[in-house]
Structure formats: C-alpha cells, structure tokens
Amino acid sequence: MSEIVAKRWASALIDLTKEDESLTSESILQNLKDVSDTFNSSEELKNAINNPSVSVEEKQIVLSKLYQGKISPIIYNFLYVLNLKKRLNIINEIADEYEKETERLNNIVRVDITSAIEIDEDKKQELKSKIENKIHKEIKADWKINNEIIAGLVFDINGTVVDNSIKHKLVELSENIIKNA
C-alpha cells in the first residue's frame, strides 16, 4: 500500500519540479536522499516523525530547524505538505519511487551484473556499452561478485535474468542428462 502512495507522491513531485527548469532531477533526488538519510540516522528523529502523538506543528518546527534554507525550497515545501498529510513516514519509499520514475522518464535501466571475479573498469565499460546497444537504453550497472557461479556473468534487467554462468550451464546439462537417461 505504501508503495502505491509513494508512487503518487513521487509522481506529484516530478510534475512539480518540471515547472522549474533550474532544478535537476539529480539535485531533487539528492535532497530527498539527504532527508531520508537524516531520518534514518537518528532513531529519536525517526520515532518522533512516526509518532502520531507528536503534533503536525511540532514536526514542522523540527523540519524547519533541520531543513529551512538548507535544501531546495521545493523539497522543503514538499516536506511541509507531506507533514500536513501525515506522510513523512514514507519519505524513503518516495525517494526510491522518485528515482525509479526519473530513470524511466530518462530511458535509464538498472542492471545487476554478477561475475565470479572482479572485472577491471575497461571490461566493465565495454560490457555496459554492449548492453546499452542491445537494449537501446542507458544503463546504471550494479556490479556484484559471486564466486559460486564459477565463471561467466548473470544479468538481471528489471527482473529478467539472463544467466550465462558456468554453474547454470552445468545445472542445465545435469538436468538434460537425467531427463534423457
């Protein structure tokens, strides 16, 4: 449920920021992440934000002391409205959904790439370029190492997994041998 609500708030923020060309999606996202990080770094602050017995006015005083003049006025006002609507508790989800939506609008895809060993930067860039050419989109690659795959690469593109690992090929071979025995 909070994911749906967060998507709506993120979408509203995107619409709001389109009106001001001086703002970039990167700066807005950074402001959102800064706020989210602040909330997450202090258990006391997190408890106060999530506590229904703390009034909207008291929360606004805290927000004012923490952020007024320190973040974009649009984000500050956005926090003010979130506070009024009692939605400050989903700021992490809103930041995540904002990032996903801006990536979608900018034709960017996140790809998790898993290898058995560390890959040097030149090879990473070469692989990234090949993937971008294949899917006709810019990618943000998240590189992982998992020596259990033995060798090869595993790509996860928006939940679609392309497994070119030796482990996967051995499992397939084993299944075929058993099936045909």
Image (cartoon, rainbow, N blue to C red):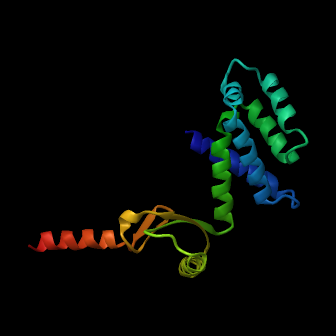
- Where does the image place residue 136, in percent across and percent down from the top left? 59, 78
Q: Would you place residue 42 above or below residue 70 in this image?
A: above
Q: Is residue 64 left or right of residue 102?
A: right
Report the residue at 19% width, 69% height from top.
175
Pinpoint residue 57: horizontal percent, then vertical percent: 82, 23
> Residue 137 falls in which quadrant of the image?
bottom right
Residue 177, image x and y in percent?
15, 73
Quarter holding the C terminus?
Answer: bottom left
Q: Quadrant of residue 109?
A: bottom right
Q: Pick whichever, 150 or 168, lies toward us.
A: 150
Q: Position of residue 115 (x, y in %)?
A: 45, 69
Compared with residue 145, is residue 60 higher up or lower down, i.e. above or below? above
From the viewer's perspective, is 164 left or right of 105?
Answer: left
Q: Residue at x 79, y 42 (%)?
A: 78
Quadrant of the snapshot with the N terminus: top right
Point 83% across, 41% down: residue: 76
Q: Residue furthest top?
A: 53
Rendered residue at 43%/69% (across/down): 116
